[in-house]
Image (cartoon, helix red, strand yellow):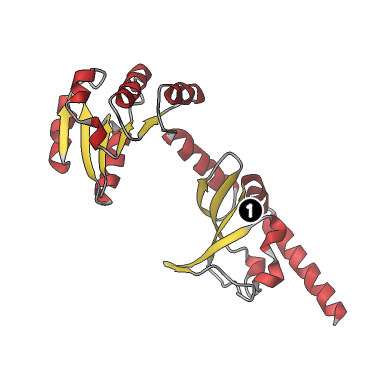
Amino acid sequence: MRSILLIGMGKFGQLLGENLLAMGDEVMIADRNEAIINALAPKYSGSLIANCMNADNLKALDIPSFAVCVVTIAEDFQASLEITSLLKDLGAKYVVSRAETAIQRKFLLRVGADEVVYPNRDIAEKLAMKLNIDKVYDYFEIDADHSIFELAVPSPWIGHSMVDVNPRQFGLNILTIKKGNKVLPPPGADYVFGDGEHMVIFGNTQQIIKFANKTSNKVLGKKLLGRKKDEDNDN
């Protein structure tokens, strides 16, 4: 269980708070909107109705005692910037701040944010990815060039082994296989792909996108059939 301070209880802040509580974290909330805090306070371990741009108000919270401080304010960037800076001045261990643009991210990092999140951008990217790539079930960006994807096993691969399909030729590193709610160990060379399975893969984002786009299944099928014909001719 971690102790987390959540500043800004708009829609995003409330959703984040609910998820943190579900994970068993001890959450303190703060917002200057009295009605919101009064409505939410019974759920949380502590609450504060205050303008957190005031250093004295933040001091009363014993900022160094929290494992993480999260600033979720979106509608007032000046407030987000000042609160982020104050939290670091008061000894915050780790500050996560919300940004809406790349410029905001730049300034938040400059004043001390340890991490900056883009909820709207992240949602838009994931939706765009799902709309443009068949059977993408999840997507997580590791850095600017690498990601982890959960993809359905391509239909041409079903009934074939890892050796047959050779995922490395597509720049894919298969971390694990999901079969329904069951997560299987990393597949070996003799693993045979089954219908309805998902694969969790790591690699270069653009390579994975190229692999998983709407025409990839046809390409994969042709490559696999071509390799099978070569093997049959050899025999």
Q: Residue furthest right?
A: 233
Asked which quadrant contains residue 216, the reply is bottom right
Q: Please provide percent x and percent y for residue 123.
A: 46, 39
Q: Nearer the viewer, residue 121 or 95?
A: 95
User: Is 53 placed left or right of 75 in the picture?
Assistant: left
The answer to whether one can see residue 32 in this image is no
Q: Nearer the viewer, residue 82 or 210?
A: 82
Q: Is residue 199 above or below residue 23?
A: below
Q: Is residue 114 above or below residue 157?
A: above
Q: Secondary structure at mark 1?
A: helix
What residue is drawn where x is 33% and y is 26%? 88
How many marks the image carries: the answer is 1
Q: Please provide percent x and percent y for residue 100.
A: 44, 27
What residue is drawn where x is 50% and y is 47%? 140
Q: Nearer the viewer, residue 93 or 142?
A: 93
User: Is 181 placed left or right of 174 in the picture?
Assistant: left
Q: Residue furthest bottom?
A: 235
Q: Which residue is label 1 attached to?
A: 212
What residue is drawn where x is 59% and y is 61%? 174
Residues packed near mark 1 inside 10 Å, few (<14), some (14 to 19) or many (20 plus): many
Q: Quadrant of the C terminus?
A: bottom right
Q: Is residue 150 above or below residue 124?
A: below
What residue is drawn where x is 40% and y is 28%? 113
Q: What's the amino acid at mark 1?
A: Ala
Q: Please provide percent x and percent y for residue 3.
A: 24, 42
Q: Please provide percent x and percent y for residue 208.
A: 63, 51
User: Is 132 placed left or right of 92 in the picture?
Assistant: right
Q: Nearer the viewer, residue 198 or 205?
A: 205
Q: Is residue 234 above or below residue 210?
A: below
